[in-house]
Image (cartoon, rainbow, N blue to C red):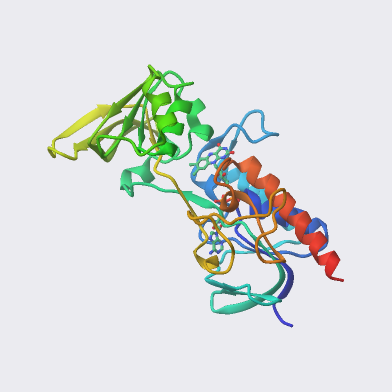
Amino acid sequence: MDNHHKVIIIGSGPAGLTAAIYTGRANLNPLVFEGIQPGGQLTITTEVENYPGFPEGVMGPELMDLFRKQAQKFNAKTLFQDVSKVDLSKRPFTIYSNEQVYFADTVIVATGASAKWLGLQSEKEYMGHGVSGCATCDGFFFKGLEVVVVGGGDTAIEEATFLTKFASKVTIIHRRDQLRASKIMQDRAKNNPKIIFLWNSEVIEIIGVTENGKKSVTGVKIRNTKTGEITNLKTGGYFVGIGHQPNTEIFEGQLEMNPTGYIITKPGSTYTSISGVFAAGDVADPIYRQAITAAGSGCAAAIDAERFLESQH
Ligand SMILES: Cc1cc2nc3c(=O)[nH]c(=O)nc-3n(C[C@H](O)[C@H](O)[C@H](O)COP(=O)(O)OP(=O)(O)OC[C@H]3O[C@@H](n4cnc5c(N)ncnc54)[C@H](O)[C@@H]3O)c2cc1C
């Protein structure tokens, strides 16, 4: 059958491209759909300091180019295309992309999860230059600075608490006058002397400068949700902590998911609710969400897929 592949990988972040390296080296000639963000989330950041093997750090886009090159070396074919629809109800599985149909004996889902943003133009402008959606990833760059965290749920409190290890002061900016976070998280934040709260407030713009070609955040413009009053707050960093959205729309009603839309895998494996379909990386991981954990589970998905294919013969 034309367009029939042993392994189709959907997504080209650390999970998808690691799965491509492993299935490529296992002579399975994987086909990778890279989607609208080739290389995944790390392509929108600057320096990555915690990916093992790069003691001097590495730029996110450069790291992902290396992943891709390594996958292509082992005959992985990568297409800069988005998958619009899948039919996982029968084998071979059917994948639709650019009005073409592809068939697969196994599918590795590695479509990631995106941090939710407020949607401000200035968030995009200063992304990786003082704007971040991940304290674990970027907190280290904010040593001794005052930073703000937007949100009022568990994510915001977790980010803020983590940031107090580095920042001199963390201001949580919340639209309402009380938090949605669990009681235990709230207590932890309220008892932390480095955390202060700015209630009934929303960020309407991030303010920054460009000096010697380098961008940095210097403040945020805030609107009081009760009075409408607009004020400026000085800050060296802006973190958004309003949650993540897994990219799983095209699998809805087909793969088992949790209420937020994360794909559920069988404990200790990458098996999904459909035999022959595997999930790796942030799309199945509401907890760690790191490049190295995504790459690790991409490797596991490749091995699971390879063993599954062997068991079918
Ligand atoms: C600003 C920022 C900085 C970060 N810094 C660090 C850091 O320093 N260290 C660290 O370890 N982690 C960092 N992270 C987290 C890290 O990027 C993620 O944990 C990791 O990229 C997850 O990898 P993934 O392969 O699961 O998914 P992603 O990297 O999200 O990749 C998802 C892929 O799926 C594709 N896709 C989605 N839908 C479709 C579709 N329908 N069809 C085809 N393809 C599709 C996308 O195009 C993309 O290629 C950072 C994240 C952000 C946002």
Residue 73 visible in this rendered orientation of the protein: no
- Frontmost residue, 106 versus 192: 192
Q: At which x and y percent is residue 181?
A: 39, 37
* Horizontal side, residue 180 vs residue 275: left or right: left
Residue 284 vertical placement versus 180 (above, below): below
The residue under the point 52% across, 51% down is 113
Q: Quadrant of the C terminus?
A: bottom right
Q: Quadrant of the N terminus?
A: bottom right
Position in image of residue 218 (x %, y %): 32, 29
> How many numbered circles are shown?
0
Where residue 259 sits in the image (x, y, percent)?
49, 55
Q: Is residue 105 something that shows in the picture?
A: yes
Whether 261 is drawn above or below 207: the answer is below
Question: In which quadrant of the rendered view does residue 257 lie?
Answer: bottom right
Q: Quadrant of residue 25?
A: bottom right
Q: 96 or 283, which is in the foreground?
A: 283
- Taking 22 as reference, is 210 left or right? left
Q: Nearer the viewer, residue 48 or 104?
A: 104
Q: 167 left or right of 234?
A: right
Q: Residue furthest front?
A: 183
Tell which residue pokes out farthest to the right in this image.
313
Write the residue at 61% across / 32% down: 50
Percent position of residue 220, x then y = 28, 33
When asked about the image quadrant of residue 2, the answer is bottom right
